[in-house]
Image: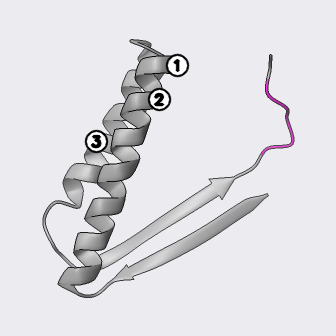
C-alpha cells in the first residue's frame, strides 16, 4: 500500500515551513541512527540522503515537497 502527500511551496513562509520540517526529520533520523544503527553503512547512507534534502531546503525557493509512505505486507523480523 502506498500513501502520498504533496506540499506546494509557493511563498517564503511555505519554504521556511518545509525547511523546518526537513531539519526536524534529519535530526530525528540522526538521533535514531545513533541509538539503533550506530556507524553502519545503511545508517550513513540514509543520513546522507536526508542531509541532502535538508540542505536543499535551506535556500527559500518555490517548489513541491512530496512524501511517499509505502507499506509492505511483510512483518518485522525479531
Whole-percent x, y for residue 9 in the image: 32, 81
- Furthest residue in direction left, as rendered: 59
Query: Disc 1 and disc 3: Cα gap in Å?
Result: 18 Å
Q: In this view, does 59 lie above or below 31?
A: below
Q: Give the labeled residue for mark 1.
A: 36
Which segment is the magenta one? 72-76
Label of residue 32 in the image = 2
Judging from the image, what secondary structure is the residue with disc 1 in?
Answer: helix
Q: How far apart are marks 3 and 2 (CA)?
A: 14 Å
Q: Which of marks 1 and 3 is in front?
A: 1
- Residue at the location (58% across, 60% down)? 68
**Looking at the image, which residue sits at the far bottom?**
10
Residue at numbered disc 3: 51
**Residue 47 location in percent, x, y?**
36, 33
- Distance, label 1 to label 2, CA atoms, is 6 Å
Would you say the residues marked 1 and 2 are in contact, meaning their CB atoms lie under 8 Å apart? Answer: yes
Amino acid at each position: 500500500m502506498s500513501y502520498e502527500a504533496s506540499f506546494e511551496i509557493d511563498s517564503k513562509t511555505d519554504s521556511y515551513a518545509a525547511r523546518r520540517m526537513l531539519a526536524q526529520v534529519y535530526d530525528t533520523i540522526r538521533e535514531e541512527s545513533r541509538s539503533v544503527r550506530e556507524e553502519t553503512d545503511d545508517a550513513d547512507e540514509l543520513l546522507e540522503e536526508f542531509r541532502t534534502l535538508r540542505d536543499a531546503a535551506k535556500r527559500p525557493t518555490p517548489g513541491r515537497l512530496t512524501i511517499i509512505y509505502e507499506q509492505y505486507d511483510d512483518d518485522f523480523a525479531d
